């Protein structure tokens, strides 16, 4: 081959390689998608493997995979870490719509409708039983229902939560408040917030969301606490433009502009508030018990600073509290063996007292909390419930009493409204207004939000 | 038609045009061979354009007329468009986007031009100043915007801008938390981030203006403003109109600024842009078809601007 021709061939090969690479980059599917049996083993891909920076969680996950594979030599678990996908709705939607989810994929309880619409999920009803998931009969019926549609099971619940009042014990003490007796009503929250913010140093007595749909989410939780609801029983009309809705916004507005107890920086969304909390700048906020886990593992806070009480109400305990959770779905087209393997893995890692997420002996010396009242996946009094509770108490590394006020005063759980994210997006505007504008007209804000939500409910109907 | 014989010579066919000589054919072949490398490289680019730009565009248009439920896709005509136009935030988003574009035309478009003129006039430290102006372009947009969000636009007195305003005894602002300041604040950040590239383009255009024109103007007694008005602007008209068009098209796709600076919609929807609304529908509301419809509407509007621009510039030519 002559030198020029040789060069040309090399150039063409290189260009073809580039084109191939480009196309490979364009491709969203890996050649090895792990969806088939390899070497006589059943292979499944599972997402939400902890990221490399979560060293202990990752080590635990990998240890679980090894132990599970040893127990089940015919199953191979291929773990996939997808960054923030496990708590980032846009990432989740993109993967779902792009058809690039793993075989067994994570989702929120409110994602069922979206997952069904995408046509990416498998009906696993015939495979879910006590031989694949030994604790299935003990799993809470409400949690199961969130993954069931028309009598068919599409997913397995792996975590659940309900909201209460999370508060910083350290700041409570400094402000002269009773650490063991958190505020029980919104009026008490307001009084406590004033005392905490009086400490100065940029500390917000109470902190609230108002952006990225989280404002609407908390508005919902707060109106539930007053006995209100977001939509009418039939789900067709908005039902928050009333005294209860007004009270939620008025309280926040007063706290911002009369008491100046909620901080100057607003338009907060999920990580913003928790960053401030981790830095010791937040006295109280409403959240689930695992908010403290996020504060510690992601936002450099300390467990010993945090405690939790029940959701505040009007004159006493809250009428209801917002609840939700997460679980795993199964991708359409899996073989019977793969579904069974996936169920076994979920049962092992997520639904067995003493193992996986409930391996309290392992978690105790680590920076993972043991003793938080949730997840509460098993029906009260069931065998699995008793076993989990006993182990949790025996290995607690957080002060259980700090969460006793929350745990011992259960409030009825109310689920999210239909088309939740769209409804939340509308209410963000009202929440941001009362927290940033001293002249905000609450009646007008609620009227506008009502009209918008009615339009969403009438024409939307697409979301979860 | 002539046919090629086994020996490569054209066979005589009566009545037909004579075949081009063999030499010409082999030249074509040579040309093809010479360009083979180029074509091979082109394939990669065209493939990526087709996959990343053209296919999604066509798919988006198709999706905007469909609805997917339970994995079943049905044709729904104009339903998605109707729904998206009835979206409570639809007109707010357009109003905000046009407002941002208008502000960006006043501020983001004019400032780089005047900075370029200034830089062109400097006799010393020219290179240093150019680097200084270009530096923000090298920052990833998200990092630049986080700097503004957490340091410059902090609504307390600790914020950089508020500290400066306070130093001069001027009233401070709530910046991104204020409905009136959201858009100007986003334009300021956006201008700072993107100015460097525009300044360089203007500088190149300014340096192409013959010095004699300025000399003649000076001899005629023209001051600096007169020289800018009568020499600089007419001489850079083409690049100015091109940049105006690019500015409109780019600013109308406003997305990252509201997403980062205003956490999405901002106070009372004051930052919601059309592109952000597309993102909201597609990724938060599980309404990809509605998002596609809004995307098509946006495409039509932007294409309209481009069409007007092409018409205007062709008339000028």
Image (tube, rainbow, N blue to C red):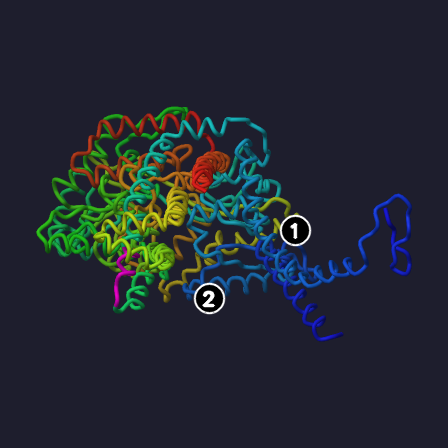
Q: How many labels sit on residues?
A: 2
Identify which residue, B99 or A312, lies in the foreground.
B99
Tell me where residue B104 appears, x and y as whole percent.
31, 45
Q: Which residues are magenta?
A: B115-123
Q: Which residue is mark 2?
A: A59
- Asked if residue B277 is positioned above or below residue A454 in the image, the reply reads below
Secondary structure type for disc 2? helix
Tell me where residue A124 appears, x and y as whole percent.
59, 42
Identify which residue, A416 or B66, lies in the foreground.
B66
Tell me where residue A159 appears, x and y as whole percent.
43, 48
Left or right position of A326 against B166 = right
Q: Chain of mark 1?
A: A
Secondary structure type for disc 1? helix
Residue A337: mark in rendering: 1
| Among the 4 quarters of the image, the one containing residue B14 | top right
* Quadrant for the N terminus of chain A in the image: bottom right
Q: Residue placed at 64% from the left, 57% from the top?
A: A31
* Among numbered discs 1 and 2, the one appearing first in the sequence: 2
Mark 2 neighbour class, 10 Å CA radius: few under 14, some 14 to 19, many 20 or more: few
């Amino acid at each position: 081959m002559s030198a020029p021709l040789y060069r040309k061939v090399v150039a063409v090969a290189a260009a073809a390689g580039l084109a191939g690479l480009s196309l490979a980059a364009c491709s969203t599917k890996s050649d090895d998608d792990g969806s088939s049996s390899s070497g006589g083993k059943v292979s499944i891909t599972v997402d939400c493997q902890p990221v490399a920076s979560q060293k202990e969680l990752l080590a635990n996950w990998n240890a679980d995979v090894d132990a599970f594979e040893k127990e089940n030599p015919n199953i191979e678990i291929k773990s996939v870490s997808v960054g923030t996908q496990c708590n980032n709705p846009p990432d989740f939607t993109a993967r779902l719509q792009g058809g690039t989810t793993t075989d067994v994929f994570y989702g929120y309880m409110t994602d069922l409708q979206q997952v069904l619409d995408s046509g990416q999920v498998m009906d696993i009803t015939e495979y879910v039983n006590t031989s694949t998931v030994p604790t299935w009969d003990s799993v809470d019926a409400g949690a199961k229902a969130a993954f069931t549609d028309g009598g068919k099971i599409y997913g397995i619940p792996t975590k659940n939560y309900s909201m209460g009042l999370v508060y910083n014990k350290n700041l409570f003490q400094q402000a002269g408040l009773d650490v063991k007796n958190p505020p029980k009503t919104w009026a008490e929250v307001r009084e406590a917030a004033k005392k905490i913010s009086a400490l100065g140093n940029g500390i917000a007595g109470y902190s609230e969301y108002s952006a990225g749909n989280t404002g609407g989410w908390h508005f919902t939780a707060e109106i539930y606490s007053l006995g209100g609801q977001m939509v009418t029983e039939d789900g067709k009309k908005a039902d928050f433009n009333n005294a209860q809705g007004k009270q939620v916004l008025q309280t926040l507005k007063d706290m911002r502009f009369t008491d100046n107890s909620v901080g100057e920086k607003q338009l907060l969304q999920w990580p913003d508030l928790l960053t401030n909390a981790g830095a010791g700048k937040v006295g109280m906020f409403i959240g689930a018990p695992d908010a403290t886990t996020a504060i510690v593992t992601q936002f450099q806070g300390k467990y010993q600073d945090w405690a939790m009480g029940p959701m505040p109400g009007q004159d006493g305990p809250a009428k209801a509290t917002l609840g939700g959770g997460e679980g795993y779905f199964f991708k359409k087209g899996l073989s019977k063996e793969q579904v069974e393997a996936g169920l076994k893995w979920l049962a092992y890692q997520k639904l067995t007292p003493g193992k996986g997420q409930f391996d309290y002996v392992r978690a105790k010396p680590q920076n993972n909390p043991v003793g938080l009242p949730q997840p509460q996946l098993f029906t009260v009094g069931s065998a699995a419930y008793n076993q989990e509770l006993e182990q949790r108490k025996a290995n607690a590394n957080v002060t259980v009493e700090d969460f006793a006020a929350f745990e011992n005063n259960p409030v009825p759980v109310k689920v999210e409204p239909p088309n939740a994210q769209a409804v939340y997006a509308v209410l963000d505007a009202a929440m941001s207004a009362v927290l940033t504008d001293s002249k905000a007209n609450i009646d007008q804000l609620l009227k506008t939000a009502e009209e918008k939500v009615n339009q969403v409910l009438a024409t939307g109907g697409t979301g979860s | 038609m002539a046919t090629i014989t086994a020996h490569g010579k054209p066979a005589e066919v009566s009545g037909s045009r004579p075949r081009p000589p063999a030499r010409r054919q082999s030249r074509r072949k040579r040309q093809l061979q010479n360009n083979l490398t180029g074509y091979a490289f082109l394939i990669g680019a065209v493939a990526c354009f087709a996959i990343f730009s053209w296919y999604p565009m066509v798919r988006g248009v198709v999706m905007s007329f469909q609805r997917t439920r339970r994995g079943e896709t049905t044709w729904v005509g104009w339903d998605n468009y109707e729904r998206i136009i009835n979206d409570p935030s639809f007109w707010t988003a357009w109003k905000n986007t046009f407002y941002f574009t208008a502000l960006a035309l006043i501020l983001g478009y004019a400032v780089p031009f005047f900075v370029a003129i200034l830089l062109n006039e400097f006799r010393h430290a020219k290179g240093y100043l150019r680097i200084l102006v270009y530096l923000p372009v090298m920052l990833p947009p998200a990092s630049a915007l986080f700097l503004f969000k957490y340091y410059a636009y902090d609504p307390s007195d600790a914020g950089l801008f508020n500290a400066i305003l306070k130093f001069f005894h001027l009233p401070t602002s709530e910046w991104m938390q204020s409905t009136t300041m959201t858009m100007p604040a986003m334009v300021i950040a956006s201008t700072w981030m993107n100015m460097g590239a525009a300044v360089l383009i203007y500088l190149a255009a300014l340096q192409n203006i013959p010095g004699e024109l300025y000399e003649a103007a000076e001899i005629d007694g023209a001051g600096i403003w007169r020289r800018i008005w009568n020499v600089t602007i007419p001489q850079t008209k083409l690049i100015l109109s091109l940049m105006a068009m690019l500015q409109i098209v780019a600013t109308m796709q406003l997305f990252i600024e509201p997403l980062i600076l205003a956490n999405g919609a901002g106070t009372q929807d004051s930052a919601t842009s059309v592109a952000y609304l597309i993102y909201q529908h597609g990724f938060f509301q599980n309404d990809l078809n509605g998002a596609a419809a809004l995307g098509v509407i946006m495409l039509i509007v932007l294409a309209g601007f481009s069409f007007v621009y092409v018409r205007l510039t062709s008339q000028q030519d």
